[in-house]
Amino acid sequence: MLRYSIGLWIALLVGGCQSVNEQMRAAGYPPAYADGYQDGCSSGREAADVRVGDFRKNVPRYLAERQYETGWDDGFRQCQSTQASQESRDYQDGYWRERDRAWHQENARDTARALRHN
């Protein structure tokens, strides 16, 4: 499983404009795994983003094809985790940016107040 994950991320970085599915197939992943990964990844991003949208799972294929099932599960976990981490970083960046802005405003007010009294 770890070998698949490492190989997948390398393939994604090198792939450029190709779809995830095309990149995975070019890297030698079985077509069923690549299809499942692409569907699971899309679903994982949506699950982490808390928006109703592009949840994709071919349930009959998931139940019948082990490679599709494994690809879907891997894609869902990896992309959900990545999306959740990115959203957490975005939230924290915004929080600290706002606190920094508020501090600078307060500092400017205090400086102006001190200069007026002199």
Image (cartoon, rainbow, N blue to C red):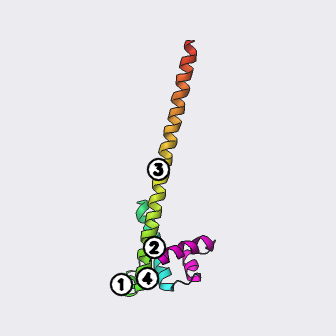
Question: Of the residues under marks 3 and 4, which one precedes in the sequence?
Answer: 4
**Disc number placed over residue 68 in the picture, else none:** 4
Relative horizontal placement of residue 79, taking residue 64 as reference (left or right): right
Q: Nearer the viewer, mark 1 or mark 3?
A: 3
What kind of element bears circle 1?
helix
Between marks 1 and 3, how big is the CA–CA gap?
37 Å
- Name the residue that disc number 3 marks: 91
Q: Which residues are magenta?
A: 1-26
Residue found farthest to the front: 3
- Name the residue that disc number 2 marks: 75
Between marks 2 and 1, how big is the CA–CA gap?
16 Å
The kind of residue on which mark 1 rests is Leu
The kind of residue on which mark 2 rests is Gly
- Name the residue that disc number 1 marks: 63
Residue 26: image x %, image y %? 59, 82
Camera sees residue 53: no
Contact, mark 2 vs mark 3 (Cβ under 8 Å): no
Between marks 2 and 3, how big is the CA–CA gap?
24 Å
Between marks 4 and 1, how big is the CA–CA gap?
9 Å
Residue 54 within the segment the image draws in magenta: no
Question: Of the residues under marks 2 and 1, which one precedes in the sequence?
Answer: 1
- Vertically, is 106 above or below 58? above
Residue 53: image x %, image y %? 44, 66
**Quadrant of the image containing the C terminus:** top right
Question: Of the residues under marks 4 and 1, which one precedes in the sequence?
Answer: 1
The residue shown at (52%, 23%) is 110
Between marks 2 and 4, how big is the CA–CA gap?
10 Å
The kind of residue on which mark 4 rests is Tyr
Residue 49: image x %, image y %? 43, 60
Contact, mark 2 vs mark 1 (Cβ under 8 Å): no
Question: Of the residues under marks 2 and 3, which one precedes in the sequence?
Answer: 2
